[in-house]
Structures are given as C-alpha cells and as structure tokens.
Image (cartoon, rainbow, N blue to C red):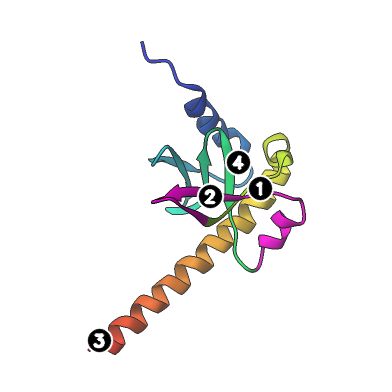
C-alpha cells in the first residue's frame, strides 16, 4: 500500500485550495511540484511551501506583505526565480486563493508571451 508523503499530501491539497480558480495539475519537478492550469505553470511547491508566479505587474503584492522570493543554490550561487511565497490567506480562503491564482496565472501568460516573442525575433534575425 502506498501512503503519500507530507509534501505529496500538501501538493494534492492544492486541488481543493484552488477549486474556485479552476482545475490544476501537478508535475514533479526537481524536489517539488510545478502547479499548472491550462498547461501553464503558475505556481510551484517546494518543501511544503506554495510559491506563485510574479512579474513587474504583481510582484509588489508579494513584497508589500514581506513574502520571500523562491531561491535555490546552483554551483554555489543563489538563483532567484520569479515566484514568491503565497500569503497564508491563500491556503485558508478559497476566494483569496482564486484571486491570487488569477494574478499569477496572468503573470505566467505574460511571461510565456514575451518568451515566444523573443524566440520569434531571434529566428527572424537568424534567417
């Protein structure tokens, strides 16, 4: 019989947390999970902590609450990703969870759009 570890239980609990936002899926990544909606990653879970996607339009919402950026160490250097710790209210209030998820999903869509533009521009200059 397979019993879920605490990190797996936490990650799967997010289906309930984001029920008003819409369906999510989880994919194992590194030592945690990516949190996806419509195939777009808008969150990640690391060590039972939820982080949500941020960009210039919504990162102040996280910083104003003193929430920390997701960081990891690679080759002795600290690397910060554009994800911030979710406020506690997200895990406690489905309406707040939906609000924060929509903002982070929008940030992820903006990031994907800008990545696609830079790839198109790179290919245009190579030909």
Q: Residue at x 72, y 56 (%)?
A: 63
Q: Which residue is mark 1?
A: 98
Label whose residue precedes the other's in the sequence (3 or 1)? 1
Q: Nearer the viewer, residue 113 or 6?
A: 6
In the figure, residue 54 lies in which quadrant?
A: bottom right
Q: Which residue is mark 4?
A: 18
Q: Secondary structure at mark 1?
A: helix
Q: Mark on residue 126?
A: 3
Q: Nearer the viewer, residue 79 or 122?
A: 79
In the figure, residue 3 lies in which quadrant?
A: top left
**Looking at the picture, does residue 49 appear above or below residue 1?**
below
Label whose residue precedes the other's in the sequence (2 or 1)? 2
Q: CA distance from mark 4 to mark 1?
A: 6 Å
Q: Which residue is mark 2?
A: 71
Residue 51: image location, x then y, percent: 58, 46
From the viewer's perspective, is the residue at label 2 or at label 4 nearer?
2
69 with respect to 79 (left or right): right
Q: CA distance from mark 2 to mark 1?
A: 24 Å
């Amino acid at each position: 019989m397979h019993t879920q570890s605490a990190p797996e239980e936490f990650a799967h609990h997010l289906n309930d947390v984001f029920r008003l936002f819409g369906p999510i899926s989880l994919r194992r990544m590194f030592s945690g999970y990516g949190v996806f909606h419509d195939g777009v990653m808008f969150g990640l879970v690391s060590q039972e902590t939820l982080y949500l996607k941020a960009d210039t339009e919504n990162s102040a919402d996280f910083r104003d609450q003193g929430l920390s950026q997701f960081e990891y160490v690679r080759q002795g250097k600290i690397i910060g990703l554009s994800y911030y710790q979710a406020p506690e209210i997200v895990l406690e209030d489905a309406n707040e969870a939906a609000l924060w998820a929509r903002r982070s999903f929008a940030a992820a869509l903006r990031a994907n759009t800008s990545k696609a533009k830079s790839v198109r521009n790179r290919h245009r200059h190579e030909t």
